[in-house]
Image (tube, grey):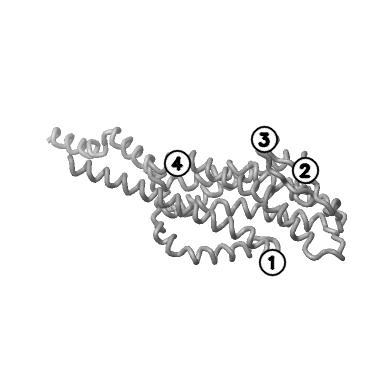
Amino acid sequence: MSSTTESKKQKPEAKGDEPPEKHDTEKEGTNGNTADTEFQKHPFTSHLGELRTRIFVALAAILVLFVVAFQFSEILFKGLTIPMRSNISFLPAYPFITFIPREGAVQELVFLAPAEAFWVHMKVSLIAAIIAASPVIFLQAWKFIAPGLHKTEKRMALPFLFTTTGLFVFGTLFCFLIVLPFAMNFLLNFRTGTLTPMISVEKYVDFCLKFILAFGVVFELPVVIVFLTRTGLITPATLAKNRKYAVLLAFVTAAILTPTPDAFNQTLMAVPIIILYEAGLLASRILAKRRAAHDSREESQGNGD
């Protein structure tokens, strides 16, 4: 009887004594899945946090470069007045580019408010900082969209970075070296025989900076078209079929982005947009052919196996 009583007393103790390894394993499994569970429960907030981080890094780069550019704002401002005072000539040999003073060009700008000159230097420094920080901006954009890409698509990081940065910088240079001198020469000499130009420095700088930034953004069109083709949202056949609507949209976009309402400046932007659209269409066709060849090769290998 005593042995039976002792065994009954010991049973609850044996039931409560579970192996410590089991408790540790359950705890480890719970901790290991915490991040995945949180991501599944709050995917939107996770994306917002990632977006906030990328924007913060891009703004930090712009701020640092703005401080540097502000130290050279006078030089940057003088360079920005070149399209107003000179014609740019391209040479086949060094120095490749020369500036020829334009006859009857406006030589001085005026400011109409006490703080206008100061804010002009701030604007010039800010736009210079944005252009200089464009590699960082595009890198942060890539890091934001990269988690949703396949492993093979993630290998396009360097081509994406070089292409987007190169097109953006090329667009700004194209505007500064070709479009702005041509536009200023036309606008300042169009039926102005009895008129004397007196241009505000703020109006001139706003005109130039809006033009330069708009061309930098517009030159990203081929990248956008290739990206949409890559994701399957559009096809080269669709792009070719809707070419006439693309031409119309180019002029509408130019009317929105150009700082003046005249048709001349709108045409100066619309024509490059159409050319860039055709370049994006050509790139998307090449990409589609490569993808079709790759798929057929994989299918033939699968049939051979």
Q: CA distance from mark 3 to mark 4?
A: 36 Å
Q: Which residue was labeled with disc 2?
A: 73
- Residue type beneath disc 1: Pro
Query: Helix or strand or loop: what does disc 2 sit on?
Result: helix
- Residue type beneath disc 2: Ser
Q: CA distance from mark 4 to mark 1?
A: 39 Å
Which mark is on residue 93? 3
Which mark is on residue 261? 1
Q: Nearer the viewer, mark 2 or mark 1?
A: 1
Quadrant where the image shows the C terminus: top left
Give the mark, 2 or 1, whose residue is nearer the N terminus: 2
Q: CA distance from mark 2 to mark 3?
A: 30 Å
Give the mark, 2 or 3, whose residue is nearer the N terminus: 2
Q: Position of residue 136 (x, y in %)?
A: 58, 41
Query: Helix or strand or loop: what does disc 3 sit on?
Result: loop
Q: Residues within 10 Å of mark 1 (few under 14, many from 20)?
A: few
